[in-house]
Image (tube, rainbow, N blue to C red):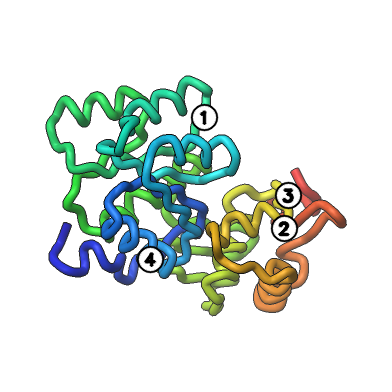
Amino acid sequence: MAPARGILAIGSQAADFMRVLLVEDDRMIGQAVQTALRQDGYAVDWVRDAESADTALTTAGFDLVLLDLGLPGRDGVDLLRTLRTRHDATPVLIVTARDDVQDRVGGLDAGADDYLVKPFDLDELGARMRALLRRSAGRGEAVFEHRGVRIDPATREVTRDGEPVTLSPREFAVLEALMLRPGAVLSRAQLEDRLYGWGESVESNAVEVYIHGLRRKLGHDFVQNVRGVGYFVPKADSQGPG
């Protein structure tokens, strides 16, 4: 971890605005990572042992897990094996002080998608998280475009027909979630899950406000809705959900 900033901030790199489960027993590291990721737009839920993580993973949906191995009681590798045994394909990035080659091999063979050794720089953590989120969404490109709208998760830049568009962090969060899977309908609850972690207050009309902002800036037809179901970005060759 780089001195000072390595544990305190990700810097200018923007997050992918997804819901993350942080499994870390060290209070100082956990608080610092959670704060830094939330500042960059992630919804981060933090637990300090494997049993709590297992419960969270069976009761809530997450886009990514940051997993320490040296947890009290049940080891992180055992949790990972349990996760994969029940066919849970949630991307897992191991973040641990165990730097032996055999530990890395064991973690990856147990089902981890990536492995990062402490101390680490959070800029690198952010880049690895974005790569895993792209892969889980079936996208290889770091920047993607749809119906004339182009977004870059690493810089948080958005353009429409080549012209820059300024979005709030939450508007960007909603836009990216919808653009990752054109045609897929996301309910208000699903969007709220991507925007807010445990304990964060959610205004009843928050998602509607963000959708209204996106329509105003990107065009009324760019984000559409299925009444009583949710919102979607139409596929390039369609006006309806896919």
Taking the spot 17% from the left edge, 69% from the top edge, the residue there is 4
Helix, strand or loop under label 1? loop
Q: State which quadrant residue 78 falls in.
A: top left
Q: CA distance from mark 3 to mark 2?
A: 10 Å
The quarter of the picture where residue 58 lies is top right
**In the rendered structure, which disc, 1 or 4, sits on the residue that comes first in sequence?**
4
Viewport quadrant of the N terminus: bottom left
Q: Position of residue 140 (x, y in %)?
A: 44, 44
CA neighbours of label 3 inside 10 A, class few (<14), some (14 to 19), many (20+): many
Tag 4–tag 2 contact (CB < 8 Å): no
> Is there a contact, CB below 8 Å, between mark 3 and mark 2?
no
Question: Which type of secondary structure does the marked residue at label 2 adopt?
Answer: helix
Mark 3 vs mark 1, CA separation in Å: 22 Å
> Could you tell me if the residues under marks 1 and 4 are in contact, i.e. CB atoms within 8 Å?
no
Q: Position of residue 41 (x, y in %)?
A: 47, 65
Q: Which mark is residue 88?
A: 1
Which labelled disc corresponds to residue 241? Answer: none
Residue 185's mark? 3
Secondary structure under tag 3 reads loop
Q: Position of residue 61 (x, y in %)?
A: 58, 43
